[in-house]
Amino acid sequence: MSSSKTVRLTDKQFALIAKALAEPRRYQILKEIGKCKEQMACSALKEGSDISAATLSHHIKELETAGLITSTKDGKYMKLTVEREVLHAYLEQLSKI
């Protein structure tokens, strides 16, 4: 069961999301994380990519800064989740341009 909450984006957050999604590799990373119904292990994301761990970490940080994903530590592992409410709010605001 998902909680339905209304998210309002500031102009700054809207710009951060646009910047994050302008990078094709970040868009692909977001799509991969979004395929999981709940959380995706960061290690699984690394296995499916041809980029270094440092580069992947940078892209994840940019998506997280924009509010598009959240990361949760599970022991020594990190799990990633798409913040669908934020993504929907971005698309809604974008459609009003």
Image: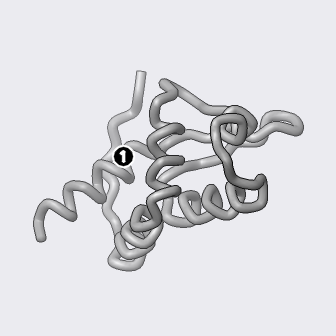
How crowded is the residue under tag 1: few (<14 C-alpha within 10 Å), some, or many (20+)?
some
Q: Residue at x 40, y 67 (%)?
A: 22
Q: Is residue 88 above or below residue 54?
A: above
Q: Is residue 35 above or below residue 67?
A: above
Near-viewer residue (78 or 26): 26
Please state if 4 lies on the left or on the right of 96 as rendered.
Answer: right
Residue 56 in picture, x, y percent from top left: 68, 55
Q: How is the image coloured?
A: one colour
Q: Residue at x 50, y 59 (%)?
A: 67
Q: Is residue 68 above or below residue 97?
A: above
**Quadrant in which the N terminus appears:** top left
- Judging by the rendered image, the residue that carries numbered circle 1 is 85
- Which amino acid is tagged 1? Glu
Q: Give the number of callouts.
A: 1
Residue 42 in picture, x, y percent from top left: 70, 40
Residue 50 in picture, x, y percent from top left: 67, 47
Q: Residue at x 87, y 35 (%)?
A: 75
**Quadrant in which the C terminus appears:** bottom left
Which of the 4 quarters of the picture holds residue 48? Answer: top right
Local secondary structure at mark 1:
helix
